[in-house]
Amino acid sequence: MPMQMTDADWDLLAAQVVRGGCTPFLGAGINQGHIPLPGDIALRWAEDGGYPLEDRWNLARVAQYMALSKGAKWPRDELAVALRDARQQDVDEKEDVLMALADLPFRTYVTTAADELLVRALRFRRSKKPRVDFVRWHEALRTTSLATVFEEDPHYVPTAEEPLVFHLYGQIAVSESLVLTEDDHFDLLVATARHPTLIPPPVQRALRGGSLLFIGHPLADWNLRVLVRSLCGGNFGEMQAGSISVHIAPPGDDNKDVVEYFERYFDRLHIKIYWGTPAEFLRTLREKCAALPAPPANKPRTRIGDDHAA
């Protein structure tokens, strides 16, 4: 029987969310029902391109093959086309993961998805004005004139009203920023290890200074695990207590061993697993947060040189 979150777990998480001490670390699975997921795109590319191996669902490996056969730019350009031309399906707003995430008072959203759907959901909530940025993980990105949000506004501090959406695997609007092939993933890890400041200090503080909420990732995503250990530290200590990873339990009556393995693995990292859908999880989290008193209003930001004399 999978372990369940206790009332104490929910109360801790809700309190952290309301006071700004929890950061969602999101994967492409949050877009379920809206646009093709990485596995869907990989399967189509593998079929069209004659990918010879069995892991046809693995986008990084299929993209690596396609880059070798069709050129390095092909996967990035093709992904941009696939996401742009996708016909979004109608999703019940009450069950919509994106809208639920936008409703919660997160200050920073860290995501491995490259699309703009989360930003659109935040903008749909008219009180929110999100800002967007991505990792400059290779030299060409670092030498362009495209400023980061913190270079454009050195006084910007992410808030619930002006949250930051930070793309770890690139932003679809800047195709050269996309992290797709296996080589890209290795290069990202090397770059962020050699140059820690590629992750802006506010994002670093969000990743290491409070609990994390993992939603939309495959249960056995090894690329993500390596990235998380690199960016968030090798082990989740006291500062990140209350971190949760949301997953649907593996199907079948004989999944007990699989469930126990992942629970033991995540427990070593001090991460609890919620077994259920993201929509179910976020519905409960919204209810728990709504039951808490609202935090004090954010003080207006001041700028260096402002005259506050009476």
Image (cartoon, helix red, strand yellow):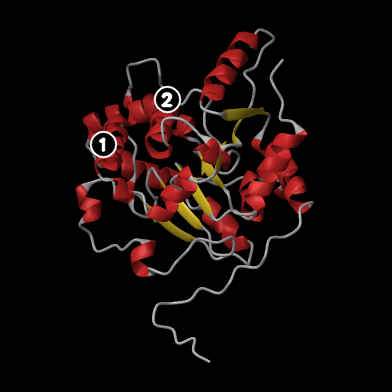
Give the quarter of the image for residue 77: top left
Tell me residue 212's x, y (percent).
Answer: 55, 40
Q: Is residue 18 above or below residue 234?
A: below
> Pointer 2: residues within 10 angstroms few (<14), some, or many (20+)?
few
Foreground residue among 247 and 154: 154
Q: Is residue 310 left or right of 276 when viewed as pictured? A: left
Looking at the image, which residue sits at the far right? 291
Judge whether residue 200 can be spotted in this image.
Answer: yes
Residue at coordinates 33% horizontally, 65% vertically from top-left?
151
User: For the residues marked 2 and 1, what is the alpha-carbon distance in whole angstroms?
Assistant: 16 Å
Residue beneath label 2, please?
222
Tell me residue 63's x, y (percent).
Answer: 33, 31
Residue at coordinates 32% horizontally, 34% vertically from top-left?
185
Residue beneath label 1, please?
190
Looking at the picture, which amino acid does disc 1 mark?
Val
Give the quarter of the image for residue 6: top right
Judge whether residue 247 can be spotted in this image.
Answer: no
Q: Is residue 138 above or below residue 149?
A: above
**Which label's residue is closer to the chain start, 2 or 1?**
1
Foreground residue among 122 and 222: 222
Looking at the picture, which amino acid does disc 2 mark?
Trp
